Image: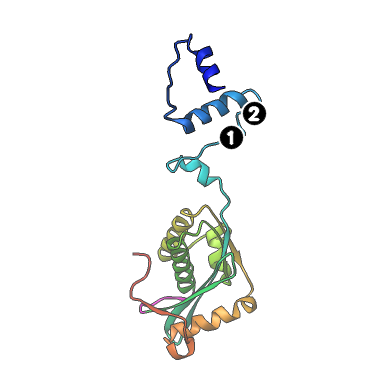
């Protein structure tokens, strides 16, 4: 049988050419075969350096931030509780080594909570505070009075602008009671009562 084929094909000038790029050729054949049958939007090839617009459209999970500031016997502190989309709690207490009012302590708590959230890459955030004044000033419902309050407000709004989306809510104090107790402990540097919650010392305010 092989001899018969050799005789039959001997009259033709045939030359064997190896296929060196079979994967590329197979892809080309596939595209040619299905080009007219498949919608051109059905296939999208992503490259590692594909533009950011693609990743920007992907949904980002929502984190929840609880903050509270407190002034106790002339000393001030704050506590931050950041809850991940999976329900994990990250807690931090801060003791302020500078003079601050109750409203300033609330602003400091919110500012530090926003900073921590940005540092770990949070994009969508629901922030909760029991300070009606701070929440309404940031949301535009109340007007900020006094130069120091205006500085706190502008700085807070700049931080919020770095997120994809932020929802700032005011909650009743009784629903924020645990956070409020920890904030008072932080104002007194009660590390024993705080237990495993890290206590940080802030020497100067966040605003000039």
Question: Which element is circle 1 on?
Answer: loop
Determine if the magenta segment contains residue 100.
yes
Label 2 vs 1, first from the N-terminus: 2
What colouring does the structure picture have?
A: rainbow
Q: Residue furthest top?
A: 11
As drawn, the label of residue 38 is: 2
Relative height, residue 194 to residue 48 (above, below) = below
In the rendered image, residue 26, in percent from the top left (x then y), is placed at 52, 30
Quadrant placement of the N terminus:
top right
Q: Which residues are magenta?
A: 97-102
Q: Residue at x 41, y 76 (%)?
A: 100
Name the magenta segment's main secondary structure.
loop
Question: Which element is circle 2 on?
Answer: loop
As drawn, the label of residue 208 is: none
As drawn, the label of residue 43 is: 1
Q: Nearer the viewer, residue 31 or 113?
A: 31
In the rendered image, residue 114, in percent from the top left (x then y), is placed at 47, 64
As measured in the structure, the alpha-carbon distance from the residue carrying label 2 to the one carrying label 1 is 9 Å
Q: Residue at x 44, y 55 (%)?
A: 158
């Amino acid at each position: 049988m092989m001899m018969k084929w050799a005789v039959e094909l001997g009259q033709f000038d045939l030359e064997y050419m190896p296929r060196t790029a079979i994967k590329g050729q197979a892809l080309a054949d596939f595209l040619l075969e299905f080009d007219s049958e498949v919608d051109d939007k059905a296939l999208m090839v992503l490259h590692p350096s594909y533009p950011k617009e693609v990743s920007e459209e992907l949904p980002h999970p929502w984190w929840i931030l609880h903050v509270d500031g407190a002034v106790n016997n002339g000393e001030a502190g704050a506590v931050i509780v950041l809850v991940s989309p999976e329900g994990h709690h990250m807690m931090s207490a801060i003791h302020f080594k500078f003079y601050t009012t109750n409203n300033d302590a609330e602003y400091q708590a919110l500012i530090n909570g926003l900073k921590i959230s940005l540092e770990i890459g949070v994009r969508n955030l629901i922030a909760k505070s029991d300070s009606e004044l701070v929440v309404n000033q940031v949301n535009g419902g109340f007007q900020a009075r006094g130069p120091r309050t205006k500085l706190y407000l502008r700085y807070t709004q700049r931080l919020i602008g770095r997120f994809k989306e932020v929802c700032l809510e005011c909650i009743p104090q009784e629903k924020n009671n645990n956070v409020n107790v920890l904030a008072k402990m932080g104002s007194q540097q009660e590390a024993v009562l705080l237990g495993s919650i890290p206590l940080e010392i802030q020497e100067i305010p966040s605003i000039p």
